[in-house]
Amino acid sequence: MTPLLEVTGLHKSYPAKRNLLGRVTERSIVTNDVSFTVARGETLGIVGESGAGKSTIGRQVLRLIEPDAGTIRFDGQDVRRFKGKELLAFRQRAQMIFQDPFSSLDPHMTIRNAVGEPLSIHFGIAGAERDRRVVEILQRVGMREDQLDKYPREFSGGQLQRIAIARALTLDPDFIVCDEPVAALDVSIQAQVLNLLLDLQVERGLSYIFISHDLSLVRFLAHRVMVMYRGEVVESGTAEELFENPQHPYTKTLVSAAPDPRSRRRSGSVPTLEA
């Protein structure tokens, strides 16, 4: 499969210590020499403990934060060189679904406006045509037309995540970063949202980066998996290869601690390795 996204040597660090003059004397590395590809219609799962750099990768790919070094190529173009209209056009094709849908939606904005806003910003669509498109996409994710003028506080967590997915789909993107999109939901609602993501991928040929600490979810959804540990990629491969025959000690630890997907038991935390 031809890569839609190609990432090479991605590096990001933040100041950790400063001297009395305010100069940085020590930096904390968040991602270090991270490279991967995502093909069209493919899901790359990124797993690892909290602080491993998973979410930072997703935000760098979308230029929500700027990398210190590395290349990001989307459909053959250098994303780091995009400015103005080029960057706006890229963000039509590449969207993000956040872990907490309530925080990602404006509490003072109705669902009609929250989902319709991207259509106005990117395409200048307003009025009846915008409402028609909003209703169409909301219905596709399982919401009703009579819910258009409600506010985020009036919905459950599962409904809010569906609304967040609808907002991400409004511009008909090719690629979506899903950053722990079901972590805050109970198991039954998780299954509904994951099945929705799978159905939409088949219908629209979407590519996903699916970020999670829950290996059973990644095993269910991802074609390939990349394991992060302290900002670095320690192992990657097809989901089948990685789960059936993990090679790196950290991957082995993660897989051995992961719940059986046939069981209702869930792991409360991700194990760590000693330095």
Image (tube, helix red, strand yellow):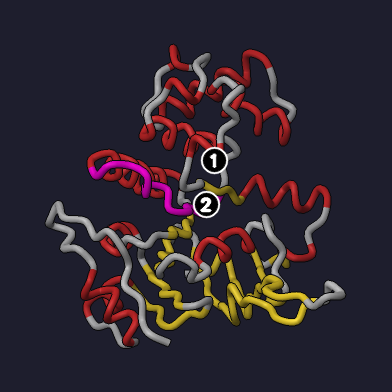
Front one among 40 and 119: 119
Furthest-front residue in view?
20
Please give left or right for residue 124 compared with residue 8 in the image.
Answer: right
Examine the rendered structure and indicate whether residue 170 appears above or below residue 111. Answer: below
The x and y percentages for residue 158 are 36, 34
Residue 130 rendering spot, x and y as whole percentages: 62, 21
- Report the amino acid beneath label 2: Ile
Does dot 1 land on a helix, a strand or a loop?
A: helix
Per the rendered image, the range of residues in magenta is 174-187
Q: Which badge, 1 or 2, is on the more N-terminal residue?
A: 1
155 falls in the magenta region: no
- Residue in view at x 54 percent, y 68 percent: 3
Secondary element type, mark 2 = strand
Q: Are marks 1 and 2 in contact (CB under 8 Å)?
A: yes
The residue tagged 1 is: 168
Three-letter amino acid code of the residue under disc 1? Ala
Number of residues whose C-alpha sits closer than 10 Å to that of mark 2, classed few (under 14), some (14–19) or many (20 or more): many
Q: Residue 241 placed where, x, y %?
A: 28, 78
Question: Where on the picture, by quarter, is residue 252?
Answer: bottom left
Write down the residue under mark 2: 176
Q: Is residue 235 above or below residue 186?
A: below
Residue displayed at 27% across by 42% down: 186
Left or right of residue 209: residue 81: right
Horizontal and vertical percent position of residue 232:
51, 80
Q: Nearer the viewer, residue 154 or 200?
A: 154
